[in-house]
Amino acid sequence: MRDVSSAGKLRTFVGSSLVLILALTAAGERRTSPSDRDKAISFRWIQPASDPQLWQQVQSAFHDELAPDEPKPGKDQLDVYRYKYLQRVGIVGRSALVIVGHQPAKGLTKANAWDVYSSAYNFDLATRQISIIEHAEWIWQWKFRRLGTFGPSLVPDVTFNYLTCTECEPDFMFDSFYYDSKQSAWQVRSWGNGKDIWWAASDGLVVDMDLSDKDDVISYDCVYGILNAEAGGFQKLAIRCKEVSYSDGGRAKIEDFTLLYGLSDGQFRAQHVTDPSEIAELTKKACQSGGPALLCKLPAYLTVTSGQSSAIDGMFPNAPQTSRKLATFRTLKRGMSMSAVVRRCGEPDELGGSGIAIFIYHLEDGSLVAIGSAGPAAPLLYVNHIERNGTVSALLTAK
């Protein structure tokens, strides 16, 4: 599922929207003069109107790659791409990053708009040598996002989103092409091995997913952003993903990881952030441009709960199976204690709060129930239902 290859050419379109923040600033001082440095790292997109001669050179060299597929009689026509075009061309020195788009027809319709993919190539303008970029042969629904200067080179990364497959339940990915100055070539950047944290892998960061085939997952919420440049002109990327899944016991299994990618000792690597205040600050920065992530719509005291939830088992030993249905929580009334709620609804999944205890339940549709209380035996202060879009509704009824 998370390994993208030509063998995975399943199709369907799943729309997603994401949060992405970019703030590019001037590069820091180097030993070389600014003019020499800027000339060496200059990157630009070219267009047919602005660079007609160079564009034509690339288009001519890619004659074979741009040739339309010829349908074969009696064969499945779904794998036939009759229209191919130069989607993007970026230039650094004599090296070109060439993105070729593949479509079933020049004019897309609702019926075939899902069936598009891109391929990425290196092209040497001097030698006219073309080579496909490894792991970029089939990139479904490729969409350029922003440029980000992550290092060690000052040539910016070309960041993008894509789907792992179509006509399936895809993961929605964030990835980038980076320029290897030693090889004078573009490569796909690796974000991890997918073992320590499964959503950080060599083929990108999983920033959203279709949950329709994942019976064990209740919700998956991610927010990420490219932060302002620091000394030296380099930027960092912050990402936080929170996955809630069913467990054999009552309380849900919650994996909440925050990674900060950046340059360290000359290498691009990830730092696992565990300090609650730093997690809250990075989440806030990543959410500044707005977006659909529930992590952006809730205060930190409702989302940063790691280290607090272990107290729940001590408060409510021998709790029944946790309810995941909103109807159960609609039966709660004023005057009830949190202990009474647990006897009816099961053990809470998380314990948050700022001044008071806030017990959090994750429902089967990905929404939350947040219950405020001064303690297990104290009367409830409020019971709120929080929808995926952040809308809050009071559930506590009169006696």
Image: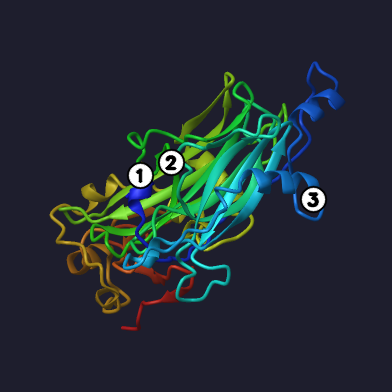
Toward which corner of the image does residue 371 lie, by quadrant?
bottom left
Nearer to us in this view, 308 or 376: 308
Residue topped by disc 3 = 52
Residue 21 in view, yes or no: no
- Disc number for residue 203: 2
The picture places residue 354, in percent across and down from the top left corner, at 47, 53
* Amino acid of disc 2: Asp
Q: Which comes before the other along the chain, label 2 or label 3?
A: 3
Alpha carbon separation for disc pair 1 and 3 = 38 Å
- Disc 3 crowd rating (10 Å Cα; few below 14, some 14-19, many 20+) is few
Nearer to us in this view, 83 or 289: 83
Q: How many numbered marks appear?
A: 3
The quadrant of the picture occupied by the C terminus is bottom left
Alpha carbon separation for disc pair 1 and 2 = 7 Å
Taking the spot 79% from the left edge, 35% from the top edge, the residue there is 26
Callouts 1 and 2 close, C-beta under 8 Å: yes
- Disc number for residue 279: none
- Disc number for residue 3: 1
The picture places residue 372, in percent across and down from the top left corner, at 39, 63
Taking the spot 40% from the left edge, 52% from the top edge, the residue there is 164
The picture places residue 194, in percent across and down from the top left corner, at 36, 37
Q: Secondary structure at mark 1?
A: loop
Q: Which comes before the other along the chain, label 1 or label 3?
A: 1
Residue 24 in view, yes or no: yes
Q: Secondary structure at mark 2?
A: loop
In the image, is 133 to the left or to the right of 57? left
Toward which corner of the image does residue 310 lie, by quadrant?
top left
* Amino acid of disc 1: Asp
The answer to whether 46 is drawn above or below residue 325 in the figure is above
Nearer to us in this view, 148 or 273: 148
